[in-house]
Image (spheres, grey):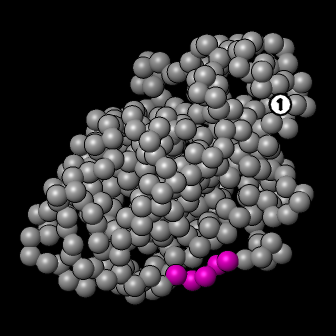
Amino acid sequence: MSVALVWVVSPNTKVLNCFGVLESSSFVLGDPSWKMRAEIRRKQKWNSCSLSSTDVKYPSSSSGTKLPILSSMVANPAGISSEQKVYDVVLKQAALVEKQLRTGREAVDVKPDIILPGNLGLLSEAYDRCREVCAEYAKTFYLGTLLMTPERRRAIWAIYVWCRRTDELVDGPNASHITPQALDRWESRLEDLFQGRPFDMLDAALSDTVTQFPVDIQPFKDMIEGMRMDLRKSTYKNFDELYLYCYYVAGTVGLMSVPVMGIAPESQATTESVYNAALALGIANQLTNILRDVGEDARRGRIYLPQDELAQSGISDTDIYAGKVTDKWRCFMKNQIKRARMFFNEAEKGVAELSEASRWPVLASLLLYRQILDEIEANDYNNFTKRAYVSKAKKLLALPTAYTRSLIRPPRTFK
């Protein structure tokens, strides 16, 4: 699979490719001998934003219609679409952040009531380890995080490390031995760290992070659900199913990260629209990963492409396993790339609404990842035997471009 770390960049070699390769299984499990059991009471006062399909109100699309992001690309006539389900989660995250903005951080009551002697030193060590992992496996993004305030950069490192560890469960060396029960235990461990009971040093960094920012547990749980999906599914009937998978393994990272990245004080955009843009970037990154890795995934017996759209194009699973680039395949790929670019365009609208120090690393990741689509085209759509990648020279050229653009706020208002 591969997760794509999103606002912060996305983890699966499908999600974690923005940040680099995953570590060994020992990194996932951590050191069980190190346990910080400081009892931090974290009273979660979330507003329930669960809506029925008739209650959901979506922000305007670029065409002015009141629909969720690119709804025309997601169809589920039988009932509530995956996008509607995901948007319910978006609303909940936005409500939590808005509550903090209205009442102040203390009123959200997410800080620990007491700091036990010795904890500060252990937390510092935990964050240092997260920093080292990010610096080693996400070099470009790591440099961008150094522009953030110390508090924000530490939090992003902690989120990144947790996502890597989660993705490694199904993509790492021991992936063949991972069972649904193992993922259940990982989710239980997640719940413990959100309650101030981290299992190891790396958990402790995230446990502290969620006391400092209005970060909700749901996107983290949803990412684990994406891992479960990878254990039981190898094909996807339509884009509605694929969209939900992309949200689980990549869009979730955007929702985790926005509270830490921060929204610019001068932004006039709604909180929901910024979260929606973060979600779009995760979907775009994951779709790009999927299109880049068609051949690699096929060799593992997986096809992350909408089965109905393949059939409409006259392409069978057998054709994909054979790896033949035909005119039918080129036409199919053009449409898939067009869809991914639409999500990138939607995401880019929200970058300017982030806090100033967060814009550069996010915009750099967006520009670099979007170039992978250009490389697929340059390879004549042969993503069976050729891996599309952005050269170091192009990456270096993209960084100053991203930095310059991150300093310029467009005159329009993103709502």
Looking at the picture, tell me which residue is in the foreground, 227 or 8.
227
Q: Residue at x 71, y 38 (%)?
A: 235
Please state if 295 lies on the left or on the right of 187 as rendered. right
Looking at the rendered structure, the kind of residue marked 1 is: Leu
Q: Residue at x 63, y 59 (%)?
A: 276
Looking at the picture, tell me which residue is in the foreground, 247 or 377.
247
The quarter of the picture where the C terminus appears is: bottom right
Please state if 223 lies on the left or on the right of 375 as rendered. left
The quarter of the picture where the N terminus appears is: top right
Point out residue 118 in the picture as x, y percentages from the top left corner.
9, 70
Instruction: Assign a secondary structure to mark 1.
Output: helix
Picture quadrant where residue 341 is located: top right
Point out residue 16 in the picture as x, y percentages from the top left corner.
46, 39
Residue 223 in sight: no
Q: Residue at x 70, y 15 (%)?
A: 323
Which residue is the site of mark 1? 310
Point out residue 144 in the picture as x, y percentages from the top left corner.
36, 43
Residue 102 against residue 333 in the figure, above or below? below
Residue 42 in sight: yes
Point out residue 69 in the picture as x, y percentages from the top left corner.
73, 55
